[in-house]
Amino acid sequence: MTQWVRVWACVCLALVLSDGAIAQGRGFVRLFDGQTLNGWTIVGKKGVGYVVRDGAIVCPADGGGNLMSEKTYSDFILRFEFKLARAGNNGVAIRTPLHGHPASEGMEIQILDDRDEMYRDIKPWQAHGSIYGVVPARRDALKPVGEWNQEEISVIGRRVRVRVNGKTVVDVDLNTITDPAILAAHPGLLRDSGHIGFAGHGPSEVQFRNIAIRDLSKPEKDNTPPPGFVALFNGRDLTGWKGLVADPPTRARMTPEQLAEAQKKADAAAFQHWKVVNGEIVYDGKQNNLCTVRDYGDFELLVDWKIHAGGDSGIYLRGSPQVQIWDRPEGSGGLYNNQKNPSNPIKKADRPVGEWNRFRILMIGDRVTVFLNGELVVHNVVMENYWERDRPIYPTGPIELQHHGDALWFKNIYIREIPRK
């Protein structure tokens, strides 16, 4: 009997080591059961898509598409093993919308037999382990074709680390990426949550097994900025905010004395109608815009907002109208006052009236990208100068919460300034 117990213990140990070795870590759970694609969904299936064979998810040479997790994740550590056939090509989708393109609307970590002659002329950011199109990886970590490799991807806030076979090949703070061309081509770098998946295609087979994740997502605390951002609203009072004085051209014509006097009156009026209640900026709809004391140039801005039925408002960028907020069929987020460039959002992503919504707004130069509730609704669109149509948008200006005669609620207002070259 004792002998059988020993045998059974050895069998169990072997099963643990073979079927879930990577999952053996505190807090890790398996994303793949070794037998089925339960918990996954395929988008844009190519050929046979993905299949399960010998305890691995296989993307055959004649298969592919995006195999996405049904769950979404924010911060996490992902571990898996992969094996490349010659010239194998795939990718790991990170924080990607279900129907979005991983390398642009999300983030893609490259899976590639980058030693193959076929890829001798690839860009540095196409090598295995790279954040595709963005951050190149060191290239000395892959095992020979046909052998199993281990990979760990850690995504915590804006810090992304990729380890291949025990070697760190990427370690980057995404906030340090400020090249306008890169940010325009890869707006998904700004997303803070989304699906995990595999983005596969030919010319040859790629296999994955022992896929496990440790979910490090944490509840967000109101009015507490994420790393790299500062709070424009402290949750207690309106420090850092002021009332609106006229428009930018009018203000520019005022003497310092005239502007100071006008500002004093605008502040006194504004603070009667814009109040702080339970950690929220609450407006009764009866005065004028609320403006930041400081001016800003290029930035990433987060704003949570809420309106009632039929409500109307917006976010002025550099003192100019506006990223639209309203209860309308076309949805919020568009650059309402554009005449020559697109003014409507790509899609409607508003939550039901009365619920909180979140903008993530990127403004670099005269171009604006807007995410609403994690959905890309404006992509790299020129914002026109409403006040002086014959001039480009002002290089700097305040952030403003727009008065439009309706009750409004705002919180979690954070900004990350982006240095200009």
Image (cartoon, rainbow, N blue to C red):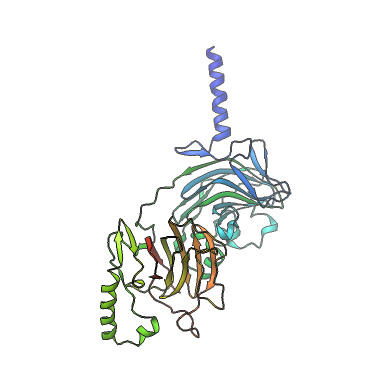
| Above/below status of 326 relative to 395 | above
Q: Residue at x 63, y 37 (%)?
A: 36
**Residue 181 in sight here:** no
- In the drawing, does residue 297 fall left or right of residue 136? left
| Above/below status of 168 relative to 292 | above
Task: Specify the quadrant that holds the C terminus.
Answer: bottom left
Percent across and percent down for residue 4 are: 56, 15
Which quarter of the figure has residue 18? top right
Q: How many marks?
A: 0
Q: Residue at x 60, y 54 (%)?
A: 99
Percent across and percent down for residue 41 are: 62, 46
Q: Residue at x 52, y 76 (%)?
A: 338
Task: Specify the quadrant that holds the N terminus.
Answer: top right
- In the drawing, does residue 391 fall left or right of residue 243? right
Q: Residue at x 28, y 81 (%)?
A: 262
| Above/below status of 1 relative to 411 | above
Percent across and percent down for residue 125 are: 57, 61
Which quarter of the figure has residue 35? top right
Which quarter of the figure has residue 240? bottom left
Task: Name the foreground residue: 177 vs 301.
Answer: 301
**Residue 128 in sight here:** yes
Task: Name the foreground residue: 206 vs 201.
Answer: 201
Percent across and percent down for residue 366 are: 49, 75
